[in-house]
Image (cartoon, grey):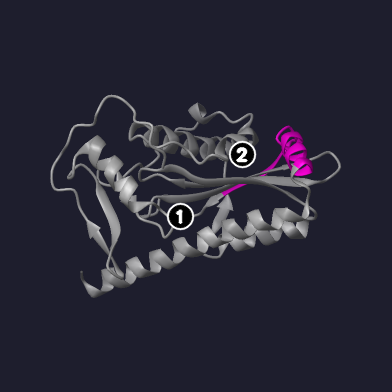
């Protein structure tokens, strides 16, 4: 692999690792509140008025990875937010969570943390919903389902009209699915699913080869199967 491409893939791997750790940190921080109380608050928060929406500034990036934050605010000023990590390459919603905040400072700290590696900017709710919807639809065609916590987080998208957004959403790479292997992905299972659905040359991928990462382009077209498998992404 050319040296500059090798350096780029290592940088992408580091960014993916940091993103995963950021989400794990957010989940751990919820432990200070009783789980039952959190669930009740989350259900209520999904009905609060929309406060603001954020999305990765460079959301049409080469990794196909997008972060989105949908925040809602209660009439008394309490904040809660749903966070999504969307892979537009092939896996759809890779991670999702909902979190209430004890203060505005705590919420701002979340935005700062998420934006360290993937800077965020204010976004329209309809665009965010369209990115999420199309990512999920694309992934389902390949046999991958959204993260188990997506369905809880999706309630924060209430009121969105993705069909009203006419922005084209980039899916895959060069007309084919693109799998960029993150540090916590089950590479063997995902590669097997893509191969079953598309054939060995029907998709692009970046996977670890020894200690390095290697970009493997698809070499020929392959027809997709008609039925969706039950495998998850």
Q: Picture quarter containing residue 61?
A: bottom left
Name the residue nearer the viewer: 167 or 1: 1
Few, some or many C-alpha atoms within 10 Å of disc 1 (few <14, some 14-19, many ≥20)? Answer: some
* Residue at image coords 62%, 36%: 152
* Residue at image coords 24%, 75%: 3
Q: Which residue is under mark 2?
A: 153
Q: Picture quarter containing residue 170?
A: top left
Q: Is residue 91 left or right of residue 101?
A: left
Q: Is residue 108 left or right of residue 127?
A: right
The quadrant of the picture occupied by the N terminus is: bottom left
Can you see residue 176? no
Q: Secondary structure at mark 1?
A: loop
* Residue at image coords 45%, 61%: 16
> Which numbered dot is residue 78?
none
Location of residue 108 in the rendering, given as x and y in whole percent from the top left corner: 70, 59
Q: Which residue is under mark 1?
A: 58
Q: Is residue 1 above or below residue 75?
A: below
Q: Secondary structure at mark 2?
A: helix
- As drawn, the residue found furthest toward the right would be 76
- As drawn, the residue found furthest toward the bottom would be 3
Kindly indicate whether the residue at mark 2 contacts the one at mark 1 (C-beta within 8 angstroms): no
Can you see residue 38? yes
| Circle 1 or circle 2, nearest the eye | 2
- The residue range painted magenta reads 36-54
Q: CA distance from mark 1 to mark 2?
A: 23 Å
Location of residue 153 in the rendering, given as x and y in whole percent from the top left corner: 61, 39
- As drawn, the residue found furthest toward the top would be 226
**Chain-order first, disc 1 or disc 2:** 1
Please tell me whether residue 38 belongs to the stretch shown in magenta.
yes
Location of residue 82 in the rendering, given as x and y in whole percent from the top left corner: 63, 44
Please tell me whether residue 145 belongs to the stretch shown in magenta.
no
* Residue at image coords 28%, 70%: 6
């Amino acid at each position: 692999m050319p040296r500059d491409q090798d350096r780029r893939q290592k940088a992408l791997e580091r960014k993916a690792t940091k993103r995963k750790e950021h989400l794990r940190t957010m989940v751990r921080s919820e432990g200070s509140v009783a789980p039952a109380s959190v669930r009740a608050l989350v259900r209520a928060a999904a009905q609060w008025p929309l406060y603001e929406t954020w999305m990765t500034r460079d959301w049409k990036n080469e990794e196909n990875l997008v972060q989105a934050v949908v925040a809602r605010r209660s009439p008394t000023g309490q904040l809660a937010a749903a966070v999504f990590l969307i892979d537009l390459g092939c896996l759809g919603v890779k991670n999702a969570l909902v979190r209430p905040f004890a203060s505005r400072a705590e919420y701002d700290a979340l935005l700062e943390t998420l934006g360290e590696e993937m800077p965020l900017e204010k976004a329209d709710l309809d665009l965010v919903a369209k990115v999420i919807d199309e990512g999920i639809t694309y992934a389902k065609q390949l046999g991958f389902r959204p993260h188990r916590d997506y369905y809880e987080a999706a309630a924060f998208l209430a009121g969105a009209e993705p069909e009203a957004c006419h922005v084209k959403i980039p899916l895959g790479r060069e007309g084919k699915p693109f799998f960029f292997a993150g540090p916590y992905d089950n590479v063997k299972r995902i590669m097997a699913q893509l191969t079953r659905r598309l054939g060995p040359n029907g998709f692009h991928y970046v996977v670890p080869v020894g200690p390095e990462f290697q970009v493997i382009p698809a070499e020929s077209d392959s027809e997709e199967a008609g039925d969706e498998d039950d495998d998850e992404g």
